[in-house]
Amino acid sequence: MASEESPMLVRTPHEAVYDRFTPHQKRWILSHVSFVGLLAMFVQVTFVPSIPRIAKDLDLMDAVVSLAFSISIFASAIGSLIWAPYSSFYGRRKIYLWGMPFLCIGSCGVALSASLQSLLFWRFVQMFGCSGALSLGIGVIGDLYKLEERGTAIGAFFSITLIGYTVAPFVGGAATQYWSWRNLHYSIGAWGLLEMLFIYLSLPETSHPGTLGIDKLSSRRSIHIVWINPLSTLWLLRSPNLFAVMLASALMVNTIYVLVVPMAYTIGVQYGITNEAIIGALVLPNGLGSLTGALIAGRLSDTVIRRWREKRRGAWCPEDRLRATWIGGLIIVPLSIGASGLITTYIGGPIGLALNVLCLYANGMGVDSVTSPVNSYNVDVVHSRSAEATAACIASWSLILSATSSLIVPSIERIGVAWTNIIAAVFAVIGQGIIFLTIRYGDRMRASIDVGFSTIENS
């Protein structure tokens, strides 16, 4: 287990495993898995602006069609819990190739849907296929980059992935308004097919030699299929450290949902915006802020790690990386979400809209200033199961946010947008308080329940 009595700041024998690929090869692999993550984010978010048109075409109520979005959150959670442990057994490359056919077939199924049952089934298949993109991508980064480099790499990964979150609402709204939601999903299926071809031709296996479960078998069949309990991944969260940072980051991500999910009923109504494409475009500032925050926080967390190791004369404390979350979690996130609620309630016209756009940008930047170091921290502390730790975190986010998001609109209707946003801001501050406690007592928390924590020799 890592502790403050770690070795001095010298190159360890374990670091040689990160020299298997040249810097150019690492950048190529990073860009490759980042664009797969971009596709997954695109699949999830483009659906939302098309809900009214799908409801009209299938003669259903909007609320009924929105079940498909809830189904996609559930599929993302279940899929990530399945793909991540299998990637530790069979390898990252194989799991990427196994997931993509589900995405392609599911996309075509969504495009062909003529009933609610068909739409829900194929939407589940579609999201299940791409649900491992984030956890596998972070797992690949953990395979490629050593301790003081991976925060920057994970920041770059999320900055590319979040382009999908940034542009997908606008693209989804525009495609629905001026083209066809069915053609949009056919296009997503074709994109998935191209990604699968690129992975097959150019993505190497990145797992460290001898670490895969299948490599450790004394004998195996030509087609060796094993059962891995997907819930075993969630068992990692029995660690107080992993559970604490998961919950804290979920409270941060929740503020994005509070801003974005009811946007048509808050900012849209207050400023007279009814066009789906324009409402989708209002998400752009939040996505751009997330992109900026991921890049800055990733590099900052690496800098913090190096400086604190130097202060301790080489000793490594994993929780040092979480110190990079302070500004985003304690200041930017609470102020941006609280200010947006007050502005929407009390300031009308172009000035109010412009200030809301600024709040959306700041909120995205603040949230990813927290989540990027948290994801890097997960890789640091359980490096051998980095994809699984990420999957457990993301799946838990999905389950928590699927519950909280259902309360947002009723809360706004009951107590108003200002108080709803202020409550979300308070929870964000509580989340940052949880991170503070993890930084302060992280070594004791790790000592209480050891889930196979990494040391400086193997992280």
Image: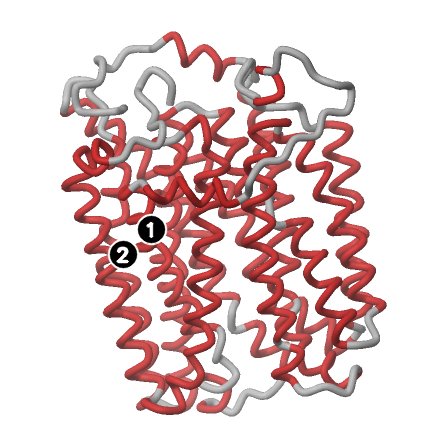
Of callouts 1 and 2, which one flags the residue occurring earlier in the amino acid sequence?
2
Q: Quadrant of residue 310?
A: top left
Q: Pointer 2: what residue?
A: 329
Q: Is residue 456 left or right of residue 84?
A: left
Is residue 246 placed above or below 210 in the rendered structure? below
Residue at 21% across / 31% down in the picture? 447
Q: Which circle marks residue 313 in the picture? A: none
Instruction: Depth check: give the residue in front, 184 or 430.
Output: 430
Question: Can you say which quadrant of the picture contains the N terminus?
Answer: top left
What residue lies at 67% left-to-right and 67% top-to-bottom? 171
Picture residue at 67% right of the left edge, 12% below the top: 219
Q: Residue at x 81, y 62 (%)?
A: 109
Q: Is residue 207 above or below residue 92?
A: above
Q: Which residue is mark 1?
A: 370
In contact (CB < 8 Å): disc 1 and disc 2: yes
| Image location of residue 378, percent across then percent down | 38, 38
